[in-house]
């Protein structure tokens, strides 16, 4: 079998890769009867030479590969028929903008497995970038606060930014004595908490966070879904009920908005779930939040100030709560400044790629090279298309197609 790493073609560009040079080399040594190839790329965080110097084949034509690994959705013109692809598809939730991709995959008889649905027997994701998104989300959001208030300036991450460098930069500045709220308790939230703890932020429990008006240091609190909603009938929060019938619950976010200076959105949100900050909430005089880092980046989702995704080159924009429109970043103190980069881990492309590769090797690469690509349960659960046909778990996409 021959495994290939394809070049990223989505715009804006993504510097990540599924496996680092060292990881590909280790796999080729462990499984000498199989081979690897890397498609040449001038944007990848790891350069072509990094792979070539380890004896890994770097080339343009990947047609002799059986399984192809990318990160983001590839250009339709690059899709080769009768191959097995792995990447983040973004159409299993019937995202309209990616319908042409799903159609192209079916027409070309592609077998497709989506990273997002690589889960263990308990339904927990086994290959994800979320932890890194939380770390970079904190960096960009504090950068936004510093620029808005003119108190400090953080350097823009370059292609070879690392976690160590990011941590050192944040530790060297005088951080604001403000209150920061993290929503959610998954991987993204965990990454955000990690970097805040590393740079000396103080964690407050919910009651203390809500009751204190001011703080002496950068302080944060973590609010889970249970803290953000109330049952419409006054019943106690039930996680299983919320997951199945989120419409039974209403937002209880106003108390948080009145006590928060910086919001870092790290929660999972479903379109049937309550909206936490609607248009009226954002314009309410009691809303204290003036900087929002929306790491989850649900456009017009649970936070209505997220009107579009932003990019690494231009991470910030202002939201005018009165006109409900986007304005230039930091153009008015009455506006809310928004960070909505939807590919945050790309700012730490080398570290994030290596971390992702470790998970991919354990849960996907090993089973493939050991001959279990068709019967491994993790891969099977993530396989949306089998030779162009929807698999049973994803038959609901028939009407979408």
Image (tube, grey):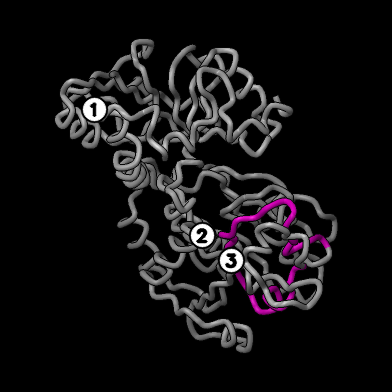
Circle 3 residue = 183
Quarter of the figure that contains the C terminus? top right
Circle 2 residue = 143
For the residues labelled 3 and 2, the Cα–Cα distance comes to 19 Å
Magenta span: predominant SS is loop
Q: Is residue 15 magenta?
A: no
Which is nearer the eye, 218 or 220? 220
Asked if residue 160 shows in the view, the reply is no
Q: Is residue 260 magenta?
A: yes
For the residues labelled 2 and 1, the Cα–Cα distance comes to 34 Å
Q: Residues within 10 Å of mark 2 (few under 14, many from 20)?
A: many
Report the disc number at residue 51. Answer: 1
Residue 64 point in image, percent of width and height: 34, 11
Q: Are the two marked residues, 1 and 3, in contact with CB atoms closer than 8 angstroms? A: no
Q: Residue at x 46, y 57 (%)?
A: 187
Q: How crowded is mark 1: few (under 14 residues within 10 Å), some or many (20 or more)?
A: many
Q: Residue at x 37, y 14 (%)?
A: 62
Residue 369 is left or right of residue 256, and the answer is left
């Amino acid at each position: 079998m021959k495994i290939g790493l394809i070049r990223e073609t989505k715009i804006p560009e993504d510097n990540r890769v599924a496996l680092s040079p060292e990881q590909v080399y280790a796999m080729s040594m462990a499984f000498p009867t199989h081979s690897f190839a890397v498609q040449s790329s001038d944007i990848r965080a790891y350069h072509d030479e990094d792979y070539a110097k380890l004896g890994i084949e770097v080339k343009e034509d990947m047609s002799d590969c059986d399984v192809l690994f990318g990160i983001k959705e590839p250009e339709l013109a690059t899709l080769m028929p009768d191959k097995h692809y792995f990447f983040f598809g973004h159409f299993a939730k019937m995202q309209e903008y990616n319908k042409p991709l799903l159609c192209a995959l079916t027409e070309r008889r592609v077998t497709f497995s989506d990273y997002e649905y690589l889960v263990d027997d308990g339904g927990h994701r086994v290959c994800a970038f979320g932890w890194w998104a939380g770390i970079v989300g904190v960096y960009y959001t504090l950068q936004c606060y510093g620029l808005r208030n003119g108190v400090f300036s953080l350097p823009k991450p370059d292609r070879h930014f690392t976690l160590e460098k990011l941590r050192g930069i944040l530790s060297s500045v005088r951080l604001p004595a403000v209150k920061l709220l993290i929503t959610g308790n998954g991987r993204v939230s965990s990454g955000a908490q990690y970097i805040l703890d590393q740079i000396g932020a103080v964690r407050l429990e919910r009651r203390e966070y809500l009751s204190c008006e001011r703080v002496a240091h950068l302080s944060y609190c973590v609010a889970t879904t249970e803290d953000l909603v109330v049952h419409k009938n006054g019943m106690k929060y039930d996680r299983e009920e919320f997951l199945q019938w989120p419409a039974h619950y209403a937002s209880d976010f106003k108390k948080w908005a009145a006590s928060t200076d910086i919001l870092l959105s790290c929660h999972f949100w479903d379109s049937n779930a309550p909206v936490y900050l609607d248009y009226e909430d954002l314009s309410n005089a009691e809303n204290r939040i003036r900087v929002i880092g929306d790491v989850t980046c649900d456009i017009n989702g649970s936070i209505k100030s997220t009107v579009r995704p932003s990019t690494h080159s231009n991470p910030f924009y202002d939201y005018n709560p009165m006109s409900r429109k986007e304005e230039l970043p930091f153009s008015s103190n009455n506006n809310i400044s928004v960070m909505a980069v939807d590919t945050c881990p790309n700012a730490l492309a080398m570290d994030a790629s290596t971390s992702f590769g470790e998970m991919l090797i354990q849960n996907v690469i090993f089973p493939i090279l050991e001959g279990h690509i068709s019967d491994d349960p993790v891969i099977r659960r993530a396989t949306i298309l089998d030779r162009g046909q929807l698999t049973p778990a994803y038959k609901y996409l028939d009407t979408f197609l």
